[in-house]
Amino acid sequence: MGIHTCLLQFESQKREEMSKRVKVKVVKGADLVVRDRRSSDPYVVLTLGNNKAKTRVVWQNLNPVWNEEFVFPITDTNRCFLKIKVWDKDKFLSIDHLDPDDYMGEAEVDLNQLVNGVSDVKKDKIVLPTSKSNCFFRDSYVTESADGKRVQEACLKLRKVDSGVVDLQIECPA
Ligand SMILES: [Ca+2]
């Protein structure tokens, strides 16, 4: 293989990586912590690589349904970690305007298997256990359809708070 071919291949590989993306659906939350008097006004901030996205606020609800979808480009297929943080929206700004919304927990999910493919080709469904980089509330599944599209269902347990889970559905096109 000449250098030129090699370079072309490298370029197309790079382009392919650049065009990779995942679609994240924030489905719902359950049993979230109280941050106002009796309830909270939760919204979710998602971070993947250098990209951020935010759901709408669901007012006064500890079991909010968002059903919102976001598309993230994958810039580094070796480091695909999706992080979420849940916040309680405050309607009124504090006097000094510096007090941020109240923290309601965070979680992380490793999208490596989803983005790079299911390692065991014989299986069309793999179970991912909870680990340091996977805050699963229960086992998560990656399923691959015949056309190569992969979908992961993940119920994330929020860290650093007493309670709360968030359901995500993450999709990686073929
Ligand atoms: Ca609030």
Image (cartoon, rainbow, N blue to C red):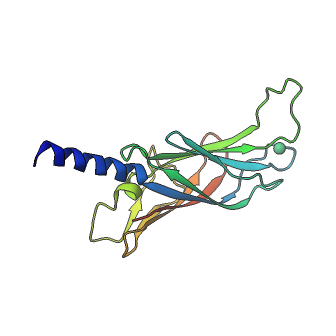
Can you tell which quarter of the image residue 37 is in?
top right
Q: Position of residue 41 (x, y in %)?
A: 80, 49
Is 91 placed left or right of 78 in the picture? right
Which residue occupies the extreme top position in the image? 96
Which residue occupies the extreme bottom position in the image? 146
**97 vs 104, nearest the viewer:** 97
Can you tell which quarter of the image residue 3 is in?
top left
Q: Is residue 135 positioned above or below 167 on the image?
A: above
Is 171 placed left or right of 34 in the picture? left
Which residue occupies the extreme front position in the image? 4
Q: Is residue 29 positioned above or below 6 on the image?
A: below
Is 75 placed left or right of 43 in the picture? left
**161 vs 69, nearest the viewer:** 69
Q: Residue at x 27, y 71 (%)?
A: 122
Tally of marks: 0
Q: Residue at x 71, y 51 (%)?
A: 32
**90 vs 105, nearest the viewer:** 90
Q: Position of residue 154 (x, y in %)?
A: 52, 59
Q: Residue at x 42, y 56 (%)?
A: 129
Quarter in which the C terminus is drawn: bottom left
Is 101 placed left or right of 122 in the picture? right
Give ligand 1's quarter of the image. Answer: top right
Q: Position of residue 16 (x, y in %)?
A: 35, 53
Can you tell which quarter of the image residue 89 is in?
top right
Q: Is residue 54 positioned above or below 23 on the image?
A: above
Q: Position of residue 24 (x, y in %)?
A: 55, 57
Q: Residue at x 89, y 37 (%)?
A: 92
Q: Is residue 75 positioned above or below 129 on the image?
A: above
